[in-house]
Amino acid sequence: MSLERILVHVCCAPDGAYVLQLLRANYSPTAFFYNPNIHPQEEYVYRRQEMERVAVWLKVPLIEEPPDFDRWFKLTEAYKNEPEKGRRCDLCYAIRLERTAERAAEQKFPLFTTVMSLSPWKKSQVINALGEALGQKYRVNFLQADFKKKNGFLKSVALSRELGLYRQDYCGCQYSLEARQQRKAKQSEAERK
Ligand code: SF4
């Protein structure tokens, strides 16, 4: 019996490796790398290359959608001062999920989902509600999930260590990179005192 095809939005290799491995038991996944949020460009290239390594390891097809960085910046600019998990992030999930739903419909996948709910920093309820709404809009079923449950996040950390994958220490966008730099600067200052 052939397994149902599913288009899986992936944002980085550690999350992609764990979730694709999990889904492979019941589905026939194709990974979809669409992340115009990632900044700077070298970071984008590195995360994509690491994802390519995972796709080869799992023997899962990988599609890259060219990132429209300028569009992402324009759409999210009004929320640049929002904290992580705020409204900028909701929009960022929506931008990436919408393109995944569109591509799933274009390529006649019956199902789509995203690995994003694996991260403790991402809001699964918002992601699932967006996925459902976009699934209805593009007439493709959305697989609801909260991959961080059942120790999913810890298992993904262990798997990425085993595979020697690059684990980034900020979410992806310029704003999250700046927040990380500020946190580090404060920490070094506190250590100097
Ligand atoms: S913090 Fe992460 S989810 Fe939020 S806008 Fe930036 S890249 Fe997107």
Image: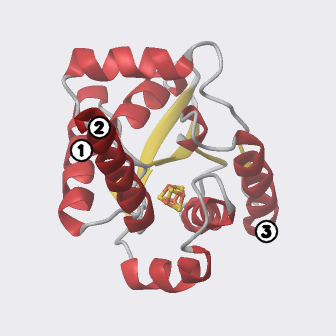
Q: Residue 15 at x, y = what percent?
A: 43, 34
Q: Residue 189 at x, y = what percent?
A: 28, 44
Q: Residue 154 at x, y = what percent?
A: 47, 16
What's the residue type where badge 1 is placed?
Answer: Glu
The label on residue 55 is 2
Q: Residue 186 at x, y = what percent?
A: 35, 47
Label 2 environment density (alpha carbons within 10 Å; few <14, some 14–19, many ≥20) = many
Q: Which residue is mark 1?
A: 52
The label on residue 4 is none
Q: Residue furthest front?
A: 193
Q: As rendered, which of 8 and 150 lies closer to the eye? A: 150
For the residues labelled 2 and 3, say whether their Cβ atoms are less than 8 Å apart: no
165 left or right, relative to 96: left
Q: As rendered, which of 52 and 121 lies closer to the eye? A: 121
Q: Secondary structure at mark 2?
A: helix
At a point 74% along the width and 63% down the height, the residue shown is: 134
For the residues labelled 1 and 3, say whether their Cβ atoms are less than 8 Å apart: no
Q: CA distance from mark 1 to mark 2?
A: 5 Å
Say whether residue 39 is visible.
yes
181 left or right, relative to 45: right
Scheme of image coloration: secondary structure
Q: Earlier in the sequence, mark 2 or mark 3?
A: 2
Kindly tell me whether mark 1's CB lies below 8 Å from ligand 1: no
For the residues labelled 1 and 2, say whether their Cβ atoms are less than 8 Å apart: yes
The label on residue 137 is 3
